[in-house]
Image: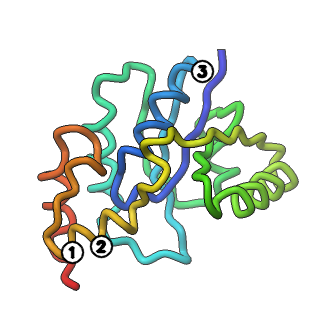
Amino acid sequence: MATLLYPGSFDPVTRGHMDIIARAAKLCETLVVAVMHNPDKRGAIDPDERVALLKKACAQMSNVRVIKHGGLLIECAADVGADAVVRGVRPLGDFENEYQMAQINRMLGGVETLLLTTSEDCANISSSIVRQIAAFGGDIENLVPEGMANDVMGALGHLKP
């Protein structure tokens, strides 16, 4: 059975991420969730703390492993022995970017990409929305993994509008 890789910045982890993780984990023997460094993004949460938050959120999923990786996605896929990459696609705007990245990753490293559409109830959730609401002290309970609002608020505590 396959090993799948789900890469992202997870800054912070959201219910949308967990939707993709739970669904992808059912499709493979091992799902590796990789906190990746994106040089185009300045992270709000330290990558090691993102890994810790994801490990807590995924604790009940025995076939999910969480790692941190600082290189190219194709290098990460090779390092973990991934058969394919999984990416979540929201209704507006994600497909074009994900399609382009999937083509580049296949061209550079022969890595296939599986695109999973988000569940309807998670389609409008993004890490940037969670960060913005948290910065204003808003309620993020329904936007992050169950029982983790305080952990995420603590990790984002330094943000101010």
- The mark closer to the camera, 3 or 2, is 2
Farthest residue to the front: give it.
120
Residue that badge 3 annotates? 27
Residue reaching furthest top?
1
SS at mark 3?
A: loop
Question: Tags 3 and 1 in contact by the CB under 8 Å rule?
Answer: no
Q: Nearer the viewer, residue 139 or 12?
A: 139
Looking at the rendered structure, the kind of residue marked 2 is: Gln
In the rendering, at what x and y percent does residue 131 appear?
Answer: 30, 68
Question: Label 1 sits on what residue type?
Answer: Ala
**Direction from residue 92 to residue 156 in the image, left or right:** left
Callout 1 crowding tier (Cα within 10 Å): few <14, some 14–19, many ≥20: some
Residue 72, label in figure: none
Q: Of marks 3 and 2, which one's residue comes earlier in the chain? A: 3
Q: Which mark is residue 135?
A: 1
For the N terminus, the quadrant is top right
Label annotation for residue 132:
2
Q: Is there a contact, CB below 8 Å, between mark 1 and mark 2?
A: yes
Query: Is 83 placed left or right of 49 in the picture?
Result: right
